[in-house]
Amino acid sequence: MLYKILLTEDSEENYRENHLDECSVNKFVAKNIGNPGVVFKKFKTNKSLQALNIVRSVENNYLLVGKLRGPHSRLEQEMNPWVDYKELGVIGDMLATSYFGGGLMSILVMHSIGDVNDSSSISFLDDINGSSFSSSYNFRDRNNVQYHHQCGIILGPSVMGRNKEMMNLICHPENLMLSNTMSAIGGIYFIFINSVKMDKSRILLTAKKAWNVGLTCYAVPCSISLIVFYQLQTYIPELTTGVFPVYLFALSSQSFLPVTAHALGELNLLTSDLGQLAISSVTVHEIIGWFLTCLAMFLQAEEAAQWIGILTVFSFLALTTFSIFVLRPLMLWIIRNTPEGKPVDETYVRGILLAPLITGVLSDILGSAYFPGAFIMGLIIPAGPPLGSAIVDKCELMLSEIFLPFLYIRIGQLTNVYSVTDWKAFGAFQFTLATGYVGKVAGSLVSLLCFKTGIRTALLLGFILNIKGVLEFVISSRWRMFKYLDDASHTAFVISNVLVTAIVTPLIQIFYKPETRLEMSHLTEIQTRTLQATPLHCELRVLCCFHCEDNVPGIITLLRAFSPTENSPICNYAVHVIELIGRATPLLDTYESKSRKPMPNSTDRIMRALSECSKASILSIVIQPFRMIAPYKVMHEMVCKLAQDKYIPLIILPFPENLEVHGKTACLRSFIANVEDNSPCTVGIFVDRNPPRYSDSTKWSFRVALFFLGGPDDREALALALRMSGNPGVSITLYRILLKEDSEKDYRENHLDECLVNRFIAKNISNPGVVFKEFKANKSLQVFDTVRSMENKYELVLVGKRRGSHSNLEEEMNPWVEYKELGVIGDMLASSDFGGGLMSILVMQSTMVED
């Protein structure tokens, strides 16, 4: 497909070039006049920006473009200052941005010697015509246990196993030994890895509300299931022996923490209020599960030899005691001897990875199943870096890609729908299990309504607690092996778990939207969430996020510039944000530094530096330290919730300009964008480029420039400058730029801009450290020329992110913005070409909510 764009303003400047272009195009069209695979489109435009908009409308997999337009091209002259990759040219640079076509198009930029490059592009296209190009992009979907179980059932005797040749291929006796061994190893490491991720402190610190909810959601379904079972036991004769039915329905009522945490991670609900409540409630179920484990040990012994069961319990307790008092101190010793920022020694990691196999075998020999031993081994390893994260990183990929598929196949082999011959027994068993699922929802309703929680939240919690996973299938397979369940009962149990998970998962996705909650929560309290509405002589609450220790000096300097005094102190909610690695559940809690800690971590050093800053006599800054551990994709929810709960009018986020080496830039930029979209207050994006400035001298000075074009974001930046003007060490230069084409679009916005500017001037009319300059611009490009003409003599530049919903500046220049989270002006200021890349930038974004 050939797009020819005729730019009127360049069409008469070079006759020779135009003639060569026309000849090349005509040659290409003439050769392919009967070719159905070639399409020719022609456009005419008067302005350069219109030509760029035409290019942006193209949707193809593979794009060819010339680098240069020619020596007299106005497009080159106007847009060259905005080109990031000069080697790609103006058009190629725009096509190479991640925002063009979702970053999924391949681009080939042609550069000839002497002649115009677009002619080279047409010649190349003419040469390759007749060949077909296709770009394929494989996106690895997240593991979904529900679908994997269904695949295992399809591969088993229920579907594909009906074919004898296929059954012999999948279940050949020579392959069964390997398959069973690999599935057992997969089960051991699945339990081990998920127990490593568990937050052990949560077990003892679970809130009273969670205990009530967890116990109710366990007792109600278990009681209902047992009552229904004993009413229908004549229809299910296979399950009427001994106390096994009690254990069966007790386990059916239990929710496992690894399974629930994994499901919440897939649903992006780990950091939500509902997810936190579900995790706390399931923790109670885990404690109850330990008692069920002891019961299982008794069940495996003969009724005439109960002393064997007692011996099994004491042997398991001995193994647990050895793990806690011998192996756990060894793990802590490894952590203490690992320097921060350095990986754990490979020898230690390999030895620890062998440990769950050993403890699992010992647990099995002692009369229990193999998974309690693996579970104990995982519990004694501290979650998170350095040790927990290293183990998860080494093992998780191998587990999910190699071992777990064998486990799913094994489950499918043991599930045969054709083994069900007594459909009355099947129906009675399914009905009994279903009453337990309904009972869990009923228990959630009863418990949460007592705490005056909404009905929707209670229902969704019941749905989450009904999600089933690998552990339920592993346990049921073991029951089948020990003849507690026959083939039909085992199949009924597996089908029931698959169906309930398939039903509740989409219901949770449909009816729970944490983003909606964040949007609605701040509408009623917007007046307390902006800098303009925060009085100058009151406490200013600021939430500062820290990714690493490098963020500390710049933010300390920034807070000092905010003019903290005894009458107007600053309360800094300092949050060290850490990616969730090697843990199952997120964490947000106040941080208490231990003075005698042998090896302080990065959080200790960040908080210590901030505390020393707050204790300085010249600064009235109070530090409220927090530590946040969560996945980057949902971390913004915890930040916004904290800002909402603490009535914070300003969030400051460091821009990840220097973190490319850690491979986290994309994640951190996504985190910033999510905070901007969901924040209940003003957000400041801080690009720090100044050297550390810790001096407490009274001669401390800080030079600030503010570009004010108008709009809610610029007003928030000016409100911050108004507060900073009270600091005698801060000098401020206000550049007000009046853009003629936007001056008559919104009278109300212009009036608000004028009022705040007049207030700033009136307050600082006798302040020698404040300078006011006003410029007029007729076009958008003149605005940028004004900004670029600023001298490199400031430590900080303040600017608003957006100009407003009707700004021509935004509409024209957005295609050239590389960092959307910084806005049009902020993106230009953040480029290395501006001011030699030596000035820090603070980009302000207001909540943009109408009064």
Image (cartoon, rainbow, N blue to C red):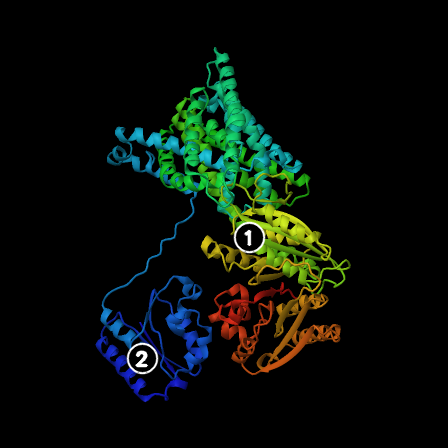
Q: Which residue is mark 1?
A: 547
Query: Residue at image x 23%, y 76%?
Result: 33
Crowding at dot 2, Cα within 10 Å, few <14 / some 14-19 / many 20+, comes out as many
Question: Which one is in front, 53 or 635?
Answer: 635
**Are circles 2 and 1 on residues that touch, CB within 8 Å?**
no
Left or right, 831 with reference to 410: right
Mark 2 or mark 1: whose residue is earlier in sequence? 2
Q: Taking 651 as reference, is 233 above or below it? A: above
Real-space Cα separation, disc 2 to disc 1, in angstroms = 48 Å
Question: Which one is in front, 83 or 41?
Answer: 83
Spot occupied by residue 826 in the image (x, y as percentages of width and height): 55, 68
**Quadrant where the image shows the N terminus:** bottom left
Tell me which amino acid carries mark 1.
Answer: His
Q: Which residue is mark 2?
A: 116
Query: Quarter of the image holding residue 215?
Result: top right
Query: Quarter of the image holding residue 554?
Result: bottom right
Question: Residue placed farthest to the right in the image?
Answer: 567
Q: Taking 262 as reference, is 317 above or below it? A: above
Spot occupied by residue 635 in the image (x, y as percentages of width and height): 55, 51
Crowding at dot 1, Cα within 10 Å, few <14 / some 14-19 / many 20+, comes out as many
Residue 833 seen in the current view: yes
Question: Which one is in front, 698 or 33?
Answer: 698
Spot occupied by residue 491 in the image (x, y as percentages of width and height): 40, 31
Query: Quarter of the image holding residue 161?
Result: top left
Q: Secondary structure at mark 1?
A: loop
Tell me which amino acid carries mark 2.
Answer: Val
